[in-house]
Image (spheres, rainbow, N blue to C red):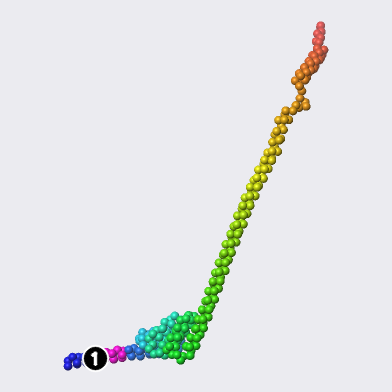
Amino acid sequence: MKYFLSHVFLVLGAFSFAQEEKQIDENALNESKNLTWEANKELSENNFITAEVDYRKAISKSDKNVAAPYNLGNAYYNKETYSEAFGRFKQAGEVAEDKPDKHRAYHNMGNVFMKRKEYQKAVEAYKEALRNDPTDEETRYNLALAKELLKKEQEQNDQNQDNKDQQDQNQDNKDEGDDKEKNKDQEQKDQDDKGDEGDEKKEDNKEGDGENKEEQKKQPDQGDKPEEQKQPRPSQLSKQQVQNLLEAMQNEEKKVQEKIDAKKVKGAKVKNEKDW
């Protein structure tokens, strides 16, 4: 009997504690909803900063209030702060227990992805939204639009890749052509260098031949001089003729000297001495 009564008291205590917890959660949820209402009012009056503060307070009060993060996400979305908006829509979708709340959260996540041009993620978000509400025609239309844009994006990417491949191929062909042209130019240059080398050799040989010819021209002139010296000059006298000429000159000089001496004797003054 005592054991039975103690068990009853434990059950009653747990039930009472659960009731208290539930009451606390309900009070927190009510406070969160009131803050959300105040935030909605501030936002309608264009007091974004005040509204943001109240939404955050509401979220911190209770994680059961789906409206607070969802409305704050809408506020960020309208401000084009898409990263913050996505975070709040995701939070709302995670805490939502009802399908309509989940549907709205995923629908708006799809809208954020569309703004970011992340069409594959938008398709997945809209599909999740339709799983929670297959009757929403707006979500269905957005899904079709996201699929169409995704298809065009993939086609454009394929076209860009084809263009890139073609450009790479053209560049490869151009490089190959340039290499061939360079090789051709190098071969021509080598041939030209060989030709120039041959011309230089020919010029050297030509200069050597010219020098040899010039040397040959000079050699006969140098050989003529000894032969000219060997020939007797027309004015050269024989030894006997020279001897005769010298004797004649001596005789002539002797005659001239005798004449001079004779004149000296004849012309000599005679000193007259007077007798005084």
Q: In the image, is residue 221 part of the stretch drawn in magenta? A: no
Q: Residue at x 35, y 89 (%)?
A: 29
Of the 4 image quadrants, the one containing the N terminus is bottom left
Snapshot quadrant of residue 231:
top right
181 vs 20, left or right, is right
- Judge by depth and name the residue closer to the eye, 274 or 31: 31
- Judge by depth and name the residue closer to the eye, 186 or 251: 186
Residue 80 visible in the snapshot: no
Q: Is residue 196 above or below residue 228?
A: below
Q: Residue at x 65, y 43 (%)?
A: 208
Image coordinates for residue 119, horizontal then vertical, percent: 48, 81
Q: Is residue 182 above or below residue 148?
A: above
Residue 221 visible in the snapshot: yes
In the rendered image, the residue lying farthest to the top is 275
Magenta highlight: main SS: helix
Q: Secondary structure at mark 1?
A: helix
Q: Residue at x 51, y 83 (%)?
A: 148
Snapshot quadrant of residue 100:
bottom left
Q: Identify residue type, mark 1.
A: Val
Of the 4 image quadrants, the one containing the C terminus is top right
- Judge by depth and name the residue closer to the eye, 52 or 78: 78
Image coordinates for residue 268, horizontal then vertical, percent: 80, 12
The residue to which callout 1 is attached is: 11
Q: Residue at x 80, y 10 (%)?
A: 271
Q: Is residue 271 above or below residue 48?
A: above
The region drawn magenta spans 14-24
Image coordinates for residue 3, horizontal then vertical, percent: 18, 91
Image coordinates for residue 73, horizontal then vertical, percent: 43, 84
